[in-house]
Image (spheres, coloured by chain):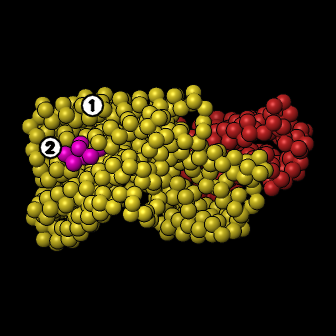
Amino acid sequence: MERTTDIPVLDVSGLPTVVFREPNPIFWGNLLYMLIEGAMFAMIFASYFYLRTRSTEWPPGLAPPYLWYGVANTILFLTSVVPARSIQLRARAGDLAGSLTGLIGLAAFGLICLVIRGFEFKGLNCRWDANAYGSMVWALLVLHTGHLLTEWIETLVMVAFASSRKMEGKRFPDFDVNSDYWYFVVGWAVIMNIVLYGTTRLL
Amino acid sequence: MITFTELSALAVAVCLIVTILKYRAPGMTLNRMPLLVWEKLVLSFMVIFAMPAVMLVSTMLLMDRTANTHFFNPAEGGDVLLYQHLFWFFGHPDVYIIFLPGAAIISTLVATFSRRHIFGYPGIVVATIATGFLGFGVWVHHMFATGIPQLSESFFTAATLMIVIPTAYQFFCWIATLWNGKPQLRLPMLWVGGFFFVFMIGGLSGLMLASVPVDLQVHDTFFVVAHFHYVLIGGAMFPMFAGIYYWFPKVVGRMAHEALAKVHFWLFFIGFNLTFFTMHFLGLRGMPRRIYTYLPEMHWTGLNQIATAGAGFMTLGILVFLINLFWSIKRGTIAGPNPWGAGSLEWSVPSPPPPYNFVHIPTVDGREAIWDAPPNPVFVSGIRDEVREVLLTNSLDAEPEAKEEQPAPSVWPFLTAVVVSAVLIGSIFTLKAVSYGALPIAFSIIAWIWPKEHEVEERREHEKWRAA
């Protein structure tokens, strides 16, 4: 419909509705939630090292966590970056089949990481109520597992979108952003495992 | 409960930042953004970095109570000071989170009622950001009496003194704006004046408390109570009342009753100073905080009676204020769109504003959009009005970039809020609330984002990818 008007106008009718990265508010919202969660991780690590300074022995009177589950999961996390990146490239090209394959791959990685995480809990060699050290390592692992679990569920929701009749253009930026959050989970997994398995042996 | 409120604060902070960065009117570059919005942006970032600390520490405390963890139990290698550190890492930035909106209201009102643009706009923005950063480096000044190392004491004293600089800078800018403008002493300006007086005294006693020897001497006395009431009531409540009287006509379409409002101000201002100024002396005479009675030979009675009388004055003031609000909503004189002749965009729409705010999205040509508008201003067209379509602009220069269709009304956000509230209240009593509650929370969030089929089809029709 054409409008006749004598006020000068800025016509925005031709602007796109499917945009990636900086132009998309979802990208910013996701980034800010990562900042919040990052601050939370930073605080819990600061608390861990603070409690370390209150004790002469570390771990105090307990064996350090079993190493190899942690190593296995770290390698797995690092490898999972491959499907995460492929989702981003496929999504930005508007390739639905490619995005779906990547999302299913990422969900599979998430599931295996969660299973190994279960063994990591078993391999902590202490209960959360043993002492402050025990509380702290459990807190680290629970906090990260919470993130892993929510990210895994989010990936499953993305799989559901990609394979349903409700798929639309604006979901592609969602896939793209989902991978950003996955990188965040991987990054903190690596840092956490260095702290959990490294500092309990070296400090 | 703390975790609950902080969760809400964090979600609001994310909403505010994304809205400020992506949904501005075309032409409102960062350099033209109203100072109120700037300070909201900075304080939202402060919320994002400060609130996780208190969420974490309240959760740890909850675990110590309900799951037998030992984070703060010294017998099992825990540490009580860890609690204080984490609490004040949130607690002190929170003081600035409370103060920044107050400062923003003052900047807005001083410009409007001086009939000129604010003096030193870039400097005020930088001062705000500096306050945001420095606010995170002073938390230990709440812990001077806990036996921390002397070097830390010196560092945190210096950091605390440093934060005076950006705050004082803003003060000088306000004075310069008034000095160089044509100040009008309209109603909200009374509260701005009250703010200058009260907050200044609070700032000066803050300088005294930043010094470790003084702090140790008056720690946990009424001197500290006096100080933080001067800072927080001065820095937040006086600007809040100024803001209420300023935006009241915009919100309800009618002016507040001027004479009643003046009675409110004087009762509150006199009552406040009677109550809290006397507390400085009580503190110096050794009256500790958090006591409900004392022996008559301490000679604190007279000053305490003055303080109590002051509290009575403040209560009367608030009563007058409430009467004024209820009276003015019904009987106040009709305000019109811009009773103060202000320059920011909200005054360009009718009072009270219609639900859709603007008929056409305006464009902005200067820091005070109305004052700086050209004779024939440009409006945005091409936004679909059969759906809730909004314009997205880029974060730095606010150039139109994309369009976004926002979802239609839905009951799921409300249900999510109900479920989250139930789970977090339940977590006070048992951790099982969290494990059982996670499932309904996940379900309601997914139901929230799950779209309706006809909406998807409609969007697919209008879909337009950004050309590569």
Separation of residues labelled 2 and 1 (CA atoms): 16 Å
- The image shows residue B240, relative to residue A73, as above or below, that is below
Q: Name the secondary structure under disc 1.
A: helix
Judged by its main secondary structure, the magenta piece is: helix
Compared across the picture, whether A129 is left or right of B173 comes to right
- Please name the color used to draw chain B: yellow
In magenta segment, residue B197? yes
Task: Tell me the subunit letter for badge 1.
Answer: B
Neighbours of disc 2 within 10 Å: few (<14), some (14-19), many (20+): many
Q: Where is residue A174 in the image (x, y as percent from the top left)?
A: 58, 46
Q: Mark 2 points at which residue?
A: B113
Question: Is residue B139 something that shows in the picture?
Answer: no
Q: Give the range drawn in magenta.
A: B193-199
Judging depth in this view, the residue of A185 and B447 nearest the camera is: A185
Residue depicted at 55% across the width and 42% down the height: B145
Q: Position of residue B171 (x, y in %)?
A: 26, 35
Q: Name the residue under label 1.
A: B121
Quadrant into which the N terminus of chain B falls: bottom right
Compared across the picture, whether B81 is left or right of B395 comes to right
Residue depicted at 51% across the width and 64% down the height: B413
Which chain is red in the picture? A
Judging depth in this view, the residue of B368 and A106 nearest the camera is: B368
Q: Where is residue B70 in the image (x, y as percent from the top left)?
A: 74, 53
Label 1 amino acid? Tyr
Residue depicted at 19% across the width and 45% down the height: B193
